[in-house]
Image (spheres, rainbow, N blue to C red):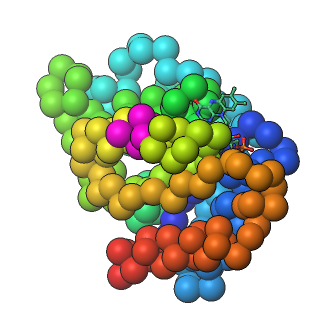
Amino acid sequence: MRICILFGSLRNNSNTALLLQPFISELERLGAEVDCLKIKDMHIESCTACWACQNVFEGPGCPKNDDMNIVYESVMKSDCIIFASPIYSWYCTPPMKAVMDRLVYGMNKYYGDTKGPCLWEGKKCALVTTCGYEIEAGSGVFEEGLRRYCKHSKLNYLGKLAVRDINGKSYFQCESTVNAARDFANKVYNSLL
Ligand SMILES: Cc1cc2nc3c(=O)[nH]c(=O)nc-3n(C[C@H](O)[C@H](O)[C@H](O)COP(=O)(O)O)c2cc1C
C-alpha cells in the first residue's frame, strides 16, 4: 500500500509539518509506504492551459518538463493521495493550487478531441490542513473545493484532519492533536485494506 502526501506549506517552521509527523509515523508503523513530496522545494510551473495533455491518453502528457513529473509518478503508483496544506485565503497555498491544476488536467482527459480516460479513477484522497480560524470557517471552503475536485476526478474522498492554529507550535504537538493525527492515519490505512 502506497500513500502520496503532497505537502504544500511555504514555511520551514510549519504547523502543517508538525501535524504530519505523527500522521506519517503511524502510517509507516501500520505498514504503508509513504512518499511525502515537499512542493515548495520543487520546480512546478502553473498550468498555462495549452490543452496538449487532453489528447494524450496513456499518461499525463504535459509538455512542461519540470518536477511535476515526480508528482505524476508518485500519484500514479499510489493508492491514496493526501493533500496537506495550510489554509491561505480560504483555500490552499499557491504551489499546492498549481499542483492541483496540473493534476486535474493531466489525469482527467475530458476535454480533448474525443473524451478520454480518467487516469486516477478509484484512488482514495484525503485532506490534512491547519488554519487560523475555527475549523469550519477556516477549512470549509477548501474542503468543499476538494470534494468537488474528487467527484470530478472519480477519486474517493475520505475526509479531513484539520487543526486550528491557536496556541503556537505546542498545540500541534499536544497529546490530543497527536492522537487525532494517529486516528486519522488509521482511518486512511483501514480504508485501503
Ligand atoms: C497569507 C496567509 C493567509 C492565511 N489565510 C487564512 C485563512 O483564510 N483562513 C484561516 O483560517 N487561516 C489562514 N491563515 C493562517 C494559516 O492557515 C495557519 O497559521 C496555518 O497553521 C499555517 O500553517 P503552516 O505553518 O504549515 O504554513 C493564513 C496565513 C497566511 C500566512
Q: Which residue is at 57% across, 49% downward? A: 129
Q: Which percent across, then down, holds residue 123?
A: 34, 59
Left or right relative to 154: residue 87: right
Up-down: is 186 above or below 131? below
Q: Residue furthest left?
A: 114
Q: Which percent across, then down, holds residue 36?
A: 65, 58
Which is more toward the observer, 38 or 83? 83
Q: Which percent across, then down, holds residue 3?
A: 51, 65
Can residue 85 be seen in this snapshot? no
Which is more toward the observer, 89 or 168? 168
Q: Which percent across, then down, holds residue 63?
A: 50, 24
Left or right relative to 129: residue 149: left
Q: Which residue is at 55% across, 44% downward? A: 134
Which is more toward the observer, 183 or 191? 183
Image quarter where the C terminus lies is bottom left
Q: Which residue is at 52% across, 76% downward? A: 183
Quarter assignment of residue 172: bottom right
State which region is magenta. Answer: 140-144
Up-down: is 67 above or below 13? above
User: Splitting the image into four quadrants, where does ligand 1 fall?
Assistant: top right
